[in-house]
Amino acid sequence: MVAIREPVERIWLHGQDLEVRSVEVLLEDGEQVTGRYTQVHPDGISVIELPSEVQPGAARIRIGYSGRFAEDASGLFRTESGGDWYVFSEFQPIQARQAFPGFDEPAFKIPYDIEIVTRRDYVALSNTRQREEELTENDLKRVRFEKTPPLPSYLVAFAVGPLDVVEGPPVPPGPWREQSVRVRGVAAKGKGAALDYALANTAVMVEALEQYFEIPYPYDKLDLVAVPGYAAAMENAGLIFYSEYLLLMEDSPSIRQQESFGATHAHELAHQWLGNLVTMAWWDDLWLNEAFANWMAEKVMAVWRPELRYGRQALASVFRTMDSDSLASARSVREPVRDSAGMFAAFDDLTYVKGAAVLTMVENYLGAELFRQGLKLHLERFSHATADVFDLVDSLETVAGEDQQLEMILRSYLFQPGVPLVSAALDCAGAEATVRLSQKRYVPLGGVSDSSGQWSIPVCMSWGGVRSEARAEQCLLLSEQSREISLGAGCPAWLMPNRGAAGYYRWEVERDNLAFLVASGQALDTLERMSLADSLAAMVRSGSIGLDEYLVALPDLAAALERSVSLAPAPEVRRILDYLVKPDQQAEARAYFGAIYERRLEFLDRPGGAEASPEEERFRFELTRFLAEDARDADVRRRLEDAARAYEEADGKSADQEVEPDLVGTMLAVGVQELGEEFFDKLLDDLAGETSAARRRDLIYAVGKAGDPLLTARARNLLLDDVIRGSEVAALLTRLTEPDRIVGTWDWFQGNRTALIERYPGVWRFYLPFHFSAFCDDRRISELEDVFLDYVTSIDGISLSLRQVQEAVGICAAYRARHAGTAREFFGSLAREAPP
C-alpha cells in the first residue's frame, strides 16, 4: 500500500533489468488503473506512467514481472556447491531492485509479507519464522513467512535450496526478554556438521549485546547462513549471511579463523540493533551502521574471548586506516552521496574503521557510562525507524549535556578527511612545566595535500618521572591551532600525548622525549606503545625523522613482550626491504631484521615454560611467518620445508597434521618456493578437490607466493581458471601483486583484463586498482590511468580508487627517494663491520 500525497501522473520507483508484463494501480475508491512501466536509468530508476492524473489517497500497486538470477553475489543470485544449486539474496546497497520493483532506499522502512514458491524438497528461508507451508502442483510448495517488522529493502533476504539446517542452543530468556531466541545454522548440503562451533558461540554474544543496550534482540529468530562462493558477510535481519570460511569450522580451527569468525559474527549481530533496528536515513550516514557495528564488536569480543585481546587488533587496523586517510584523495567519513558510485565508495575502511575510532574517542571523552546511556536512548527513540548523525548528537547530548560540544567534534572528524597531527613541545624553563600543543594535517612525503586543517580534538595526555610509576593525566579539547597547558610544578621525564591511544590522531614530540618513550617500556601501556610504534613509522614516512633513527629504535620495540608491540614495526620493515634495500644488500638487511626477531621466537619456544596462552601462540605463529617469509631465516625455512616434504609424501594427509593450523599457509608457501614444480602441481591437485574454505585459502595463498617465474606465470593463469572460484580471485590476485611479482602481473593484467574483470565479483570491481598500489615508481602513475580510465563509466567507484592508488604510488616513490641512500649506508656499514 502506498500513500499518494498530491495529484500525480507518474509514480517513480526502482526496478532494474526486470521484464515487466503488467502494472495495475488499485485506488482507494475501488477504481483500477493500468499503468506503463519504464526503466529510465541503468541504476534501476523507473517510472509508472498513468493514463490520467490520480488524486491523493491510498493505493495498491500490483506489478507482474520476471527476472534472471545473477551469477555473482548481487540481487538474487544462484551458486553451486557439490553439484547442487542454491539461490541467495544480496541487496545492499541497491540490489533489491534487481529482485523486485519497489522503493529501494533506506528511508522507506516498511513491513514485508514474503512468500516463496520452490521445490518441495528444498528449504526456503527469509527474515522471519515460517508461518505456513502449502503444497502446490508440479511438486512445488508455497512457503509463507510471518510479517517482518519495518525493514529497509536492503535487509530483506532469501535463502533457497537443499540446505542443511542445524538447530543450535537458543539464546535463553533474560532480564530484557521473556522468551528464548531460536538459533539455527544453515549450510549447503553435507556441510551442516561444521556449524557446531558457530552455533555454540552465538548465545553469549547476543546476551552481551542485550546487556549493553538493555534492549532485547529485535527479531523472532536468528539464522546463520554459510553461503557457498560468498566472500563477505551481510547483516540481514534474522537471516545473517557469511562466507563459508567464517562460519564453517573443522575440529581444530586456527586462532586466526576463530578470531575472524568472532569479530565478524559480533559485528553482524551488533547490526541487528545498530543498522537494522535503527537505520541510517541515507547512505551518507552509512558510518552510523558500520562504524557502530565495528566499535561494538570490540566490546563483544572482550566478553566472548578476552584472552584474544582483540582490542589490540582493532587498534592496529586504525593505524593502517590512517595511512589511507592521509591521502589528499581520501574522502570524508560522512560525504554527500549523490549517485551509486558514492554509495559503493562509502564501503571502505574510513567508514568502518575510522568511524569506529572516532566513536572510541568520543566515548573516552564523555565517559563510557554516559555514552552507553546516550546510545540506549537513541535506539529507543528511533526503534524500527531511521536516524541521522544529528539525531545521534541530540540523543548523546540529552544525556551528557549540550556543553560537551559533540557536534563540533563530530563535524570536524566526519565532515572532512585527513588525520590530525598533534605536536607536543615540553617547556620546563619556568616555575611550572608547560606543554604547547599544536595541530595540523599529517602529510606523508610525496603527499599532495597541504598541512592546513583544524579539528576539535579530545586530547588526553599522561606524563611522569624517570623512576616513579605514578602518572599524571589531563584531558582537554584542542580546537585551536595551538594552545599552551600548564602541567604543574616539576619537570616530567616523559610526556605521552595520546593516553590509552584513544584519540584519532598521530603525534610528535621532541627527540629527547621520543628517545625516553622508546627506551623505557615501563612508562607506557600496551596500546600506548602501539601508538608510539605507529607514530615513529609515520615520522619516517613524513620525513620528520631519518630512517637511521627508526632503525636504531627498532630493537627496543621488537623486544616488547606483547605481540602487538613487538611486531608493530613489521609492516615498516617490509616496506624497507621492498623499496629501500638494493638487491646486493638484501642478505645483510634480512639478517639484521632476522637477528632481532629470532631472539623473540627463542624466548617463546623456551622449554619448561607455562602453557602458552592464545596470545603467545599467535605471537609465535606470526614471528615464524615473519622470519620465514620476510627475513628468510634459513633455520625457520628449513623446518617448514621439512614439514612441506612430509605433507607431499603423505598422500591425502592434511597439511595441519604437519604444522599448526595457523602456519599451514606459510608452510605450503615455503614448500612451493623450495620444492618447485612438483609441489606446486600437488597443491593444484589438492585445490581441485578441496571443499573446505579454510584449506582452500591456505592453498591459494601458497600458489600465489611461488617464487619461480614460470610457476608465477602459471599462477596468474589460474585467475581465469574455474579451479579458482570467483569469490577467490581477489585473494590470489593480492598475492600475485606483491612487490616482487607486481610487474609481471601488471603486464599479464593488461592483456587479460576483460576476462579477469568478468570473473571478479561485480559489486567489488571498483577495488581492482588497489591491487596495484604496491608500485613505487612515478612512471607507473600514467600507466594506471591509461588502463583504468576505460572503466570509469562502467564500474561505479573506480575513479576514486584510481586516484587513491596513483597518489599512493607517488608517495612511495617520494619515500624511496628520501630514504634509499640512508638504507644503503646503514646496511653497507653492517657488511663492513661483519667478521670475515
Image: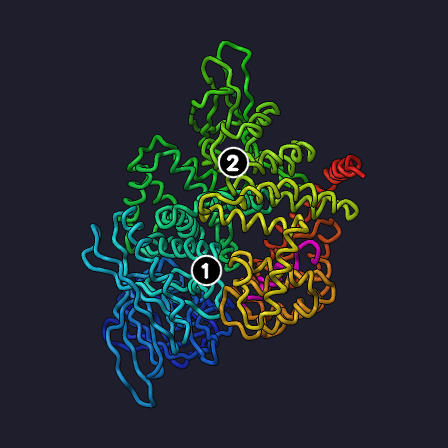
Which quarter of the figure has residue 508?
top right
Q: Is residue 20 found left or right of 598 in the rendered image?
A: left
> Considering depth in this image, is 808 or 151 the residue closer to the camera?
808
Q: Is residue 721 found left or right of 238 in the rendered image?
A: right
Residue occupying image coordinates x 47% and y 54%: 255
Sort mark 2 into few (<14), some (14-19) or many (20+) by Cα contacts within 10 Å. Answer: many
> Considering depth in this image, is 305 or 23 the residue closer to the camera?
305
> Considering depth in this image, is 366 or 3 the residue closer to the camera?
366
Find disc 2 in the rendering and name its residue. Answer: 505
Q: How much space separates mark 2 and mark 1, taking CA atoms?
A: 36 Å
- Amino acid on which the number 1 mark rests in the picture: Pro
Q: Residue furthest bottom?
A: 138
- Magenta span: chief secondary structure: helix
* Residue 643 versus residue 118 in the image, above or below: above
The reply to whether the magenta stretch includes residue 230 is no
Q: Residue 211: x, y in percent?
A: 27, 48
Q: Residue 823: x, y in percent?
A: 74, 39
Mark carried by residue 441: none
The part of the chain drawn in magenta is: 727-741
Find disc 1 in the rendering and name its residue. Answer: 253
- Amino acid on which the number 2 mark rests in the picture: Tyr
Q: Residue 421: x, y in percent?
A: 55, 33
Sort mark 1 into few (<14), some (14-19) or many (20+) by Cα contacts within 10 Å. Answer: some
